[in-house]
Amino acid sequence: MGDPKRQRKKFETPKYPWSKDNLETELRLLGDYGLRNKRELWRHHTKLSKYRAMARKLQGKTRKERSKAEKQLLSKLFSVGLISANSSLADVLDLTIKDFLERRLQMIVFRQRLAKTPHQARQMIVHGHIAIKGKRIIFPSYIVKRDDEPTLTYAPTSTIATPDHPIQKALTNSSVPKS
């Protein structure tokens, strides 16, 4: 049995945290994507840097050595929706933090016009109004897989799922741009 393992942080902080350019960029991303704090941003940035490091490491190997690992990496990133079906390692190196932030449940809910703003999308997710394949997801940072995206709806037992709910009326009457 034993004690549970010690939890470790899942992010790395910026090398120069007080750089004016970094601070402005981070603050803009926090606002645009409705993030709660910079740790959420840093966690996705760390994931991005790990995937890019894997791609650089694979590029240095011979074709025979890297074929299996390359297929695994590309299929993983394709299933998450970060790259297209016929992508290469060069496309993995071109990924940006915005690509990762766009795949968060919070942004997918906003882009599918289930919420008016990213902040409202976050609130709806945390309160349990959003479901994927009929199962409630309460984590705004959940990375939505490409196959799960069409099954994203309001939770069946949610009060927002009824067409006469004020949020539903506001969304149908408003001119929220669809991206």
Image (tube, grey):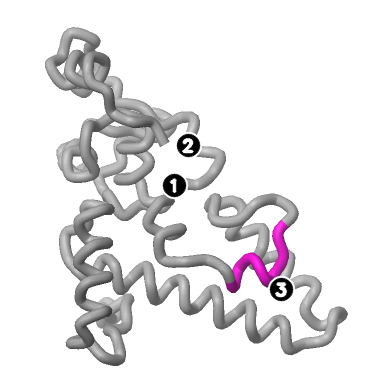
Query: For the residue carrying disc 1, how many other residues have a C-alpha within 10 Å: few (<14), some (14-19), or many (20+)?
Result: many
Q: Is any part of residue 2 visible from this angle?
A: no
Q: Is any part of residue 45 visible from this angle?
A: yes
Q: Give the CA distance from mark 2 to mark 1.
A: 6 Å
User: Residue 144: which disc?
Assistant: 1
The image quadrant where one finds the C terminus is: top left
The image quadrant where one finds the N terminus is: bottom left
* Secondary element at image label 1: loop
Q: Is residue 49 rendered to the left or right of residue 172?
A: right
Residue wearing tag 2: 149
* Secondary element at image label 3: helix
Please report the bounds of the magenta region as a residue range. 87-93
Which residue is located at x 22 percent, y 61 percent?
30
Residue contact between numbered discs 2 and 1, judged by CB atoms under 8 Å: yes
Of badges 2 and 3, the one in the foreground is 2
Q: Nearer the viewer, residue 5 or 136?
A: 136
Mark 1 vs 3, N-terminal side = 3
In this view, 46 is above or below 121:
below
Percent position of residue 129, x then y: 22, 31
User: Residue 71: which disc?
Assistant: none
Amino acid at pointer 1: Val
User: Residue 69: which disc?
Assistant: 3
Amino acid at pointer 3: Ala
